[in-house]
Image (spheres, helix red, strand yellow):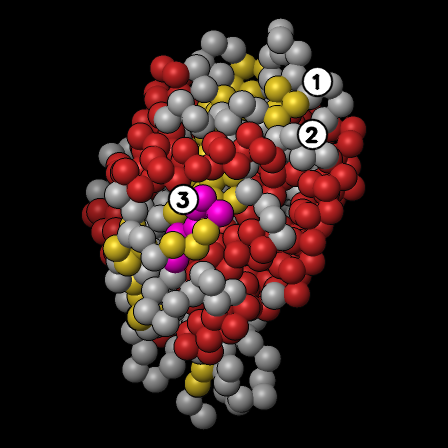
Amino acid sequence: MALSIKPGTGWADAYRRCQAAAPEAFDDDRVRNHWGGRWRRDGDPAPATSPVDGTPIAGPPLLPAAGAAAAVRAALDRHREWRHTPLAERRARVGAALDALAAHRDLLALLLVWEIGKPWRLATADVDRAVDGVRWYVEEIDRMIVGRRPLEGPVSNIASWNYPMSVLIHAMLVQVLAGNAAIAKTPTDGGLACLTLACALAAGEGLPVTLVSGAGRELSAALVRAPEIGCVSFVGGRDTGAHVAAAVADLGKRHVLEQEGLNCWGVWEYSDWPRLAGQIRRTFDYAKQRCTAYPRFVVQRSLFDRFLAAYLPAVGQVRFGHPLAVDDPDDPLPELDFGPLINDAKAKELAGQVDEAIARGGVPLYRGTPADGRFLPGQDTSAYFAPVTILGPPPSSPLHHAEPFGPVDTIVLVDTEAELLAAMNASNGALVASVSCDDEATARRLAAEVRAFKVGIGEPRSRGDRDELFGGLGASWHGAFVGGELLVHAVTEGPADERLPGNFLTYTLQPG
């Protein structure tokens, strides 16, 4: 029987539900920007299609620089009012917004499926993490703001498209809870409707949120350099992050800049292969399109045959395809490891990098095909990319030193501990890393030499929630670290002589 989209989950169905939930934000022909306390039909909507199957979807209404500047000035006015709002009222309003998000949880998740291609399991998890994470802050905020006050201006959020809820909306609501107004730029590549609905629900509870769309180069002057901005929070790649870092350094502005790094998993003097096989399968969640993905395995040469015997069956079990395709209308949505990449351009770029790496000497160990996926008859599959594994990527290849942001693994073989550490530190800093070694003392000794903020011993590490801290070393992070009370401290003012934990131009301070 041919697959079909599960009834009630089409894009048109999702958009109609958005209009019913927040008619002020969703017009028949476009989505609106929100600033100055109003939803506005400004900006020119850009065309957009879903990476899932090429379906036309709502595109971002792109503001020019002048429009963004007006939005920032309006956000400052709202910030100056909100920063004096009593904590009890802030807590109550944020709590009401969380209730509204929870009530629309499945719609928000469905938007994530269509706009950025997340499978249902991962889309619902993204929404749940945002809501549950901020609820923890609502309960814990009192102890976090003792002796602190809101910033002098609003927080500007510029984030990548991959986690609109658990990263971007989560951060904005905590910033508001701490007494700041929050501004967000819609990621150009996806997440518009999901973010618009979430911000509409928050604004409906009286929270000072601003949501605008536009090209980064057009909006940078307003969202990064404007004197009204109290803090810049950025999540994205190193190239864009470097420009933001240079701007905030020149201005002496508070900042939190999370950037990519090549997160590595080292395997040394190890024997628990069934455990590692299960972990390898899970590293392919969301096609490794996340900042804490593990696209590089650094393996002791003498263990390579046993590693490969565990690795190949694991990667062969990875399931990908259309996230909403079912055999029967009554079937649940499929259990997939990933759907499409963010767009067909990324799939083409990654295919070119793989072909170039192999042509220059990399050895293809595994190469999936589109035939391995679950697709509708005749659907557009141009944004999909099957898993690939390359042994020994050549130094000239981007796959040797940079994060691919797709389901491509590279394996590097080493003979000594020094080679292991050099290979794991190839990208001058990372967010996470892991070391699998039978002897825990050896694993911890090696982990201490890896330039990553978090290093797992025999297990993966993630961004974390609630009280777990997060940051990066080297070029993977600039500015204040976050997580737990550090996220609140990053967007509030403390004592005059305070040195926030973080990776700054003039100092690096690990949390105590």
Q: Is residue 348 at least partly visible in the picture?
A: yes
Q: Is residue 433 left or right of residue 242?
A: right
Q: Is 506 placed left or right of 342 in the picture? A: right
Residue at the disc numbered 1:
512
Quarter of the image for residue 27 reads bottom left
Mark 2 element type: helix
The amino acid on which the numbered mark 1 sits, given as a three-letter code, is: Gly
Amino acid type at circle 2 is Glu
> Which one is earlier in the sequence, the residue at label 2 or at label 3?
3
Q: Amino acid at mark 3?
A: Lys
Looking at the rendered image, the disc whose residue lies closer to the viewer, 2 or 3, is 3
* Mark-to-mark CA distance, 2 and 3: 25 Å
Which quadrant, please, contains the C terminus?
A: top right
Image coords of residue 462 (percent x, y):
60, 42
- The residue that disc 3 covers is 185
* CA neighbours of label 3 inside 10 A, class few (<14), some (14 to 19), many (20+): many
Q: For the point 76% across and 23% down, which residue is it?
A: 146
Using the image as rendered, state which of residue 333 and residue 97 is in the foreground.
Answer: 97
State the residue at coordinates (54%, 23%).
152
- Percent x, y of residue 46: 26, 58
The correct choice, above or below, for 133 with respect to 103 in the image is: above
* Residue 269 shows in this picture: no
Say above or below: 351 vs 357. Answer: below
**Which residue is located at x 43 percent, y 55 percent?**
39
| Residue range (magenta) | 32-37
Q: Dot 1: what SS?
A: loop
Q: Which mark is residue 485?
A: 2
* Residue at 45% from the left image edge and 27% from the top image edge: 229
